Amino acid sequence: MSTINFSAREINFKIVYYGCGMSGKTTNLKKIYESIPGTAKGELVSLATEDERTLFFDFLPLDLGQVNGFKTRFHLYTVPGQVFYNSSRKLILRGVDGIVFVADSAPNRLRANAESLRNLRDNLTEYGLSMDEIPYVVQVNKRDLPDALPSDMIKKVLDPSGKTQFFDAVAAKYIGVTEPLKAVSQLVLEHLAQKA
Amino acid sequence: MLQPSLELYGESFEKVDALLDDLLAKSHAQYVLIVDLKGFVIAHNKALWAPKPPSLDSLATLIASNYSANLAIAKLFGETGFKEMIQQGDRVGMYVEELDETALLVTLFDTTAALGRVKMFTKKAVTEIQTILSENKGEAPTMNFDENWHNSTRALIDGLFGPSK
Ligand SMILES: Nc1nc2c(ncn2[C@@H]2O[C@H](COP(=O)(O)OP(=O)(O)O)[C@@H](O)[C@H]2O)c(=O)[nH]1
Ligand SMILES: [Mg+2]
């Protein structure tokens, strides 16, 4: 799926942060934007409502650098999490190369996490894709909540077969933000090499 | 599969590049872009006299998303799409034409350009680019994902996000 531009000598990857509303997807992009050095990042674009809820998407381009004469770039996107924004979520998944699923540790969001994952599966199916073919990792966010559910419990619900990489995170404090992004980037690059 | 976005490389790229320059000159537009519907810039040219454009990444992703959202709206009404995609501000206008199912040709212009000319020459350029794309372009270039490539990408990822713990 990755887009290779032979004339501009660029390889572009699209990584989408998925998950239910308020799980911390936008926070991930904001923290990455704040922490990555200036030359490696582009502008952060947010299409949000007045109260900072994602309306369409957030977007952040990252430059990895040159490999074998090709500029390698990651375009990060978030989706709007709320259930009724599904048509927008579907549009953003177009051409996706890798997914970071951001799960919320709050007890009352367990069900919303599971529903969002099912929704991801359904939306991918509409593009003729399955979760097994797309590099995919999970970030279990908001580990700082006093009543956070045990990570293992969330893991069992979201990944009964235990095949997926999970990362605990407190995105608001930039803890566990780079790890899942690194992991999915690595998977995406390996995936590309295998398919070539 | 690697997706060469719009099979554009080598000689066909040179031709399209020349066409974009021609489009700029004839339409008096400031910028022309070919944008992939995934939000990537495939090609872009700027008129010599035009100021530095805003971030092309931002531009491309917003144009592609805007196009996709409009297409989705059209489909809600049983349409296959909307015919005219024009945005006009006080100083800047944007005209969008479909190149194929994966890409758009975008012309951005200021008040010195006449919309009629912009439309006419953009449409003409679309037809010409489509012809170039349909011609036999010979062997597609390939990329070599060897050990060296793996090591380099791993090092770059560590460089950007910090080494693994
Ligand atoms: N306690 C806690 N709150 C967080 C964390 N990460 C994000 N939040 C908060 O959760 C809310 C929703 O975050 P946002 O990134 O907008 O969620 P999105 O809907 O997934 O984009 C905001 O108020 C954030 O400050 C975290 O790690 N811990
Ligand atoms: Mg958000």
Image: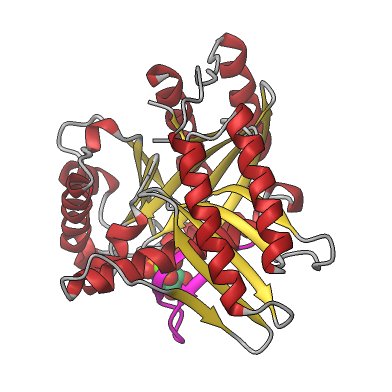
**Colour logic:** secondary structure
Q: Position of residue A159 (x, y in %)?
A: 20, 39
Residue, x 46% and y 79% (percent of image)? A52
Ligand 2: quadrant of the figure = bottom left
Read off the magenta span.
A43-58
Q: Name, please, the residue furthest toward the bottom.
A: B90
- Residue A179 seen in render: yes
Q: Nearer the viewer, residue B130 or A42?
A: B130
**Quarter location, residue A137:** top left
**Quarter location, residue A21:** bottom left
Q: Nearer the viewer, residue B91 or B126?
A: B126
Q: Is residue A81 magenta?
A: no
User: In screen coordinates, is A23 left or right of B95?
Assistant: left
Q: Nearer the viewer, residue A174 or B62?
A: B62
Residue, x 39% and y 70% (percent of image)? A56
- Residue A104 seen in render: no
Q: Position of residue B39 (x, y in %)?
A: 48, 54
Q: Position of residue B16 (x, y in %)?
A: 61, 43
- Total labels drawn: 0
Q: Position of residue A134 (x, y in %)?
A: 31, 35
Q: Is residue A45 magenta?
A: yes
Residue, x 43% and y 69% (percent of image)? B66
User: In screen coordinates, is B2 left or right of B95?
Assistant: left
Q: Name, please, the residue furthest toward the top.
A: B147
Q: Please state, as top left, top right, bottom left or bottom right, where the N terminus of chain B lies in the image.
A: top left
Q: Nearer the viewer, residue A2 or B150?
A: A2
Q: Please state, as top left, top right, bottom left or bottom right, where the C terminus of chain B lies in the image.
A: top right
